[in-house]
Image (spheres, rainbow, N blue to C red):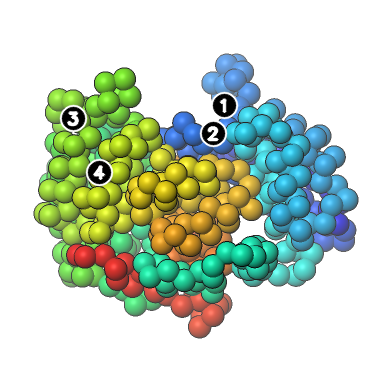
């Protein structure tokens, strides 16, 4: 039984205010969660409630969301059973009453939803990963009349726990690094590693080599973006990929077989909906049509060892997305982030129209733990790879590391290895690998066995 609900304004990795919630069951230590925050947000995300008071943190304060937790949410949750996650989340949705969580704020709601999960873990003396695994299996069992999770493409993603393949940012552009490059993330996926620790050691080595290479070539190999990746001023997007490939080689590894490349194009943020065109400012190219962008991405896939492309087209460009999927969906993972915003209705639209083949899963895009699990389940059921993801504004909260292992979702995208709010998650995975051993195997790049590379 929930006895106490508290909230406060704390700060994220960009120094922006965010919501922390603590929930306590009788005679137990508090469960605590801190909500992350995006910069390149999709317009269909649940609403993050900010104070809009220009005299405090340029309007970014979250005291209204904090007050909503302390009053309305506390009143609604005190006396409830913290172990019934679905009932807690249903209550939060009902209390808010809006489609996009704009009344209480998705930041207030998610903080409470997660803190309740942590409170119940405390009450049952479970570790967070055990508690999330229990919530996940209870959720799956409650789904009668749904086929068991077992589809060809995602067959390795099942009910059991597993360590994820990390997808790690090396170079940042877009809104995360002053738009010095148009594409937002140049990532690596250590597909050939046989354990999470080995994968992570490769990543750290490549990151170090990349810094040295950037310094040697006269770029800033020390300045980093919001997610800890390097933020050099390069002449074009493809130069970034070349440096990353060079760093993989400098680490003594084989690009493609050992370590593949991923992109988060985040193209919503250089898309003009009115003219239906894409504008690559950093490289000075003229307006591109969706077809032009698809042709460019296909050339990239032909040239570089790319296995994953996120938001190759914009959140509204369903038509372009469908063509992109027809052209490249059998060769690479095509992740919808701004496109799906972890929202079941939008993912359903993607599934029905055979658009994309993967979904980014961010808790705060949708706003409760249960809804996040619903989206995850829908993705796996329909052969869409889920990628659990952090936001560009993060904290020491490690929920996503525990959640990705607990659900066996298979992939995690947290940013780079140069900032502690990211390392909090990566280090938690190192602990979980040791603690869970055979209970949470590492499938690594094996999840991509159906791609024609
Ligand atoms: P965001 O970026 O958290 O700023 O939205 C992450 C992403 O686009 O994947
Ligand atoms: Zn993205």
**From this viewpoint, is residue 46 visible?**
yes
In the rendered structure, which disc, 4 or 1, sits on the residue that comes first in sequence? 1
In the rendered structure, which disc, 1 or 2, sits on the residue that comes first in sequence? 2
Where's residue 353, x and y in %? 38, 46
What residue is pinned by disc 2? 16
In the rendered structure, which disc, 4 or 2, sits on the residue that comes first in sequence? 2
Q: CA distance from mark 4 to mark 3?
A: 15 Å
Q: Residue at x 48, y 51 (%)?
A: 361
Q: Does the beta carbon of the residue at mark 1 sit less than 8 Å from ligand 1?
A: no
What residue is pinned by disc 4? 323
Residue closer to the observer: 342 or 175: 342
- Answer few, some or many: residues within 10 Å of disc 3's Cα (few below 14, many 20 plus, some between 14 and 19): some
Task: Name the element at disc 1.
Answer: loop
Q: Residue at x 68, y 64 (%)?
A: 142
Q: Is residue 404 left or right of residue 4?
A: left
Q: Is residue 27 left or right of residue 403?
A: right
Residue 431's place in the image compared with 55, above or below, is below
**Pointer 4 with pointer 2, Cβ within 8 A:** no
Where's residue 300, x and y in %? 15, 49
What residue is pinned by disc 3? 288
Residue closer to the observer: 364 or 193: 364
**Pointer 3 with pointer 2, Cβ within 8 A:** no
Q: Give the quadrant of the C terminus.
A: bottom left
**Pointer 1 with pointer 2, Cβ within 8 A:** yes
In the rendered structure, which disc, 3 or 2, sits on the residue that comes first in sequence? 2
Residue closer to the observer: 192 or 44: 44
Q: Does the beta carbon of the residue at mark 4 sit less than 8 Å from ligand 2?
A: no
Residue occupying the far bottom of the picture: 438
């Amino acid at each position: 039984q929930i006895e106490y609900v508290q909230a406060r304004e704390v700060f994220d990795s960009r120094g922006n205010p965010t919501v922390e919630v603590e929930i306590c069951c009788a005679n137990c230590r508090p469960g605590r969660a801190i909500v992350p925050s995006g910069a390149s947000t999709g317009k269909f995300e649940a609403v993050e409630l900010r104070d809009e008071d220009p005299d405090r943190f340029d309007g970014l304060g979250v005291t209204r969301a904090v007050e909503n937790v302390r009053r309305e949410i506390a009143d609604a949750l005190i006396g409830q059973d913290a172990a019934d996650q679905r009932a807690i989340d249903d209550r939060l949705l009902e209390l808010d009453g809006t489609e996009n969580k704009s009344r209480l704020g998705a930041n207030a709601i998610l903080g409470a939803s997660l803190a309740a999960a942590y409170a119940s873990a405390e009450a049952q003396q479970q570790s967070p990963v055990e508690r999330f695994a229990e919530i996940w299996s209870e959720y799956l069992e409650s789904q009668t009349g749904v086929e068991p999770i077992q589809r060809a493409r995602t067959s390795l993603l099942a009910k059991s726990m597993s360590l994820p393949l990390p997808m790690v940012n090396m170079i940042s552009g877009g809104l995360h690094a002053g738009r010095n490059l148009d594409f937002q993330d140049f990532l690596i996926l250590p597909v050939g590693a046989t354990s999470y620790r080995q994968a992570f050691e490769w990543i750290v080595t490549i990151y170090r080599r990349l810094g040295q290479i950037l310094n040697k070539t006269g770029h800033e190999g020390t300045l980093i973006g919001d997610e800890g990746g390097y933020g050099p001023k390069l002449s074009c997007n493809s130069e970034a990929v070349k440096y990353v490939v060079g760093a993989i080689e400098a680490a003594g590894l084989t690009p493609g077989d050992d370590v593949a490349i991923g992109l988060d194009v985040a193209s919503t943020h250089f898309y003009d909906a009115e003219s239906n065109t894409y504008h690559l400012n950093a490289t000075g190219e003229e307006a591109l049509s969706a077809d032009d962008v698809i042709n460019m991405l296909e050339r990239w896939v032909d040239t570089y060892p790319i296995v994953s492309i996120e938001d190759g087209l914009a959140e509204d460009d369903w038509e372009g997305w469908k063509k992109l999927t027809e052209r490249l969906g059998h060769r690479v993972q095509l992740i919808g982030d701004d496109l799906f915003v972890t929202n079941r209705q939008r993912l359903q639209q993607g599934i029905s129209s055979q658009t994309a083949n993967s979904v980014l899963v961010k808790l705060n895009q949708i706003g409760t733990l249960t809804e996040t699990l619903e989206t995850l389940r829908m993705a796996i059921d329909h052969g869409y790879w889920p990628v659990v993801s952090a936001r560009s504004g993060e904290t020491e909260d490690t929920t996503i590391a525990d959640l990705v292992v607990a659900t066996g979702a298979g992939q995690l995208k947290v940013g780079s290895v140069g900032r502690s709010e990211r390392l909090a998650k990566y280090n938690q995975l190192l602990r979980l690998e040791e603690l869970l051993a055979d209970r949470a195997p590492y499938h690594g790049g094996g999840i991509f066995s159906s791609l024609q590379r």
